[in-house]
Image (cartoon, helix red, strand yellow):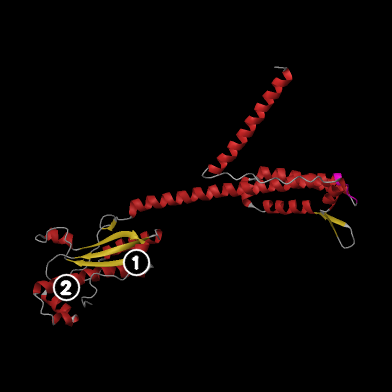
Amino acid sequence: MSGVTQRAVTLGKSLWIVGTLTAVTGCAALFRGDPVPPEPPRPALSKQLPGEQADAEQGGVVRNDAGEIIDYQPLAQARSVLEQARASAAVAEYGSEALETAESRLQAAESAWQSAGAAPSDELLRRAKHEAYLARRWAQIALAQAGRERGLGELGAAKQTLEAREAADARWLGSYLVPEAYGALDFATGTARLTPGSQQVVARLADFLQDHDRYGLRISGHTDSAPPSTQNLDAFLQENPDLSEADLSEEDAAALYNLAMSKRRAGAVKAQLVEAGIESARLDVFAFGQAQPRASNDTAAGRRKNRRVEVLVVRAEEARQQAGRETVEGLGLK
């Protein structure tokens, strides 16, 4: 086989392989589940004639009604962005280097523009336009850097605030300020009047709420199971005629008296806090009477433990949701 014939055969095989691969590739595209669409044709780049290029450069020249040159649009745009960057305190802190570069480029653009005079050449306009573009871009970089750093700073501050709140919640939420942290609240025997020593405890509670506006307090009143004096019980029943007519046993009447007393004592603490300037909705009153003893009522020491007011820290939103709801509502007690 001659060399010419061999080259012809080789060329024919190559064309067959190319044609086969093309056909297979086309068919494969049809059978793919998510065929990739072909890239759209790119528009042909138009060549700018010298006259058109000159018109483009001269088009940025700003003239007054008399036809006098007063400014150059690329320069005006660069000045505007630089003014914005100069006025930003964040740029001064985080983007000063980029702003210095922008200032330098703007000076170069202004110099080229000043050299142009009343009849600027296309070469000087191109130089001024290029330097103005660089000045504008560097000013934008300065603004972007400042925005990024400021955002990171705000994010860091928000994270610290959140961590501080979580730490405060871990320390305070669900804790008993009374009696554990600030001591006990005591009342004159048979009354809801706080003793002078207990006023200091109430003052500390008010200070806590003023320092922690995210929290509220749940004030719970409790008593022992000892019956009141006959005089106090009679006065209580006279204040609540519906109970007098209910034919209650002495034990039930005493339990209701204790329930009412626990409400009054918890309410007295709330009233003192409101008087100190605390929002009423942040303070919940719960009255349990003798229903939740902490110790046996068979001993004097146990009864002292049971006669108590407890103050629990809760979220302010939770307190507002419970505001006004008391366990003695609906019993007809005053």
The answer to whether 309 is drawn above or below residue 48 in the figure is below
Tell whether label 2 touches label 1 (CB within 8 Å).
no
Among the 4 quarters of the image, the one containing residue 265: bottom left
User: Which one is closest to the eye, mark 1 or mark 2?
Assistant: 1
Q: Residue at x 11, y 61 (%)?
A: 297
- SS class, disc 2: helix
User: In the image, residue 156 lies at what x, y percent?
Assistant: 50, 47
Check disc 2 and report the residue beneath it.
Answer: 257
Q: Is residue 259 left or right of residue 124?
A: left
User: In the image, residue 52 lies at what x, y percent?
Assistant: 85, 49
- SS class, disc 1: helix
Looking at the image, the residue that sits furthest to the front is 1
Check disc 1 and report the residue beneath it.
Answer: 321
Q: Closest to the observer: 201 or 197?
A: 201
The answer to whether 152 is drawn above or below residue 173 in the figure is above
Q: Closest to the observer: 198 or 153?
A: 153
Number of dots carrying numbers: 2
Q: CA distance from mark 1 to mark 2?
A: 28 Å
Mark 2 neighbour class, 10 Å CA radius: few under 14, some 14 to 19, many 20 or more: many
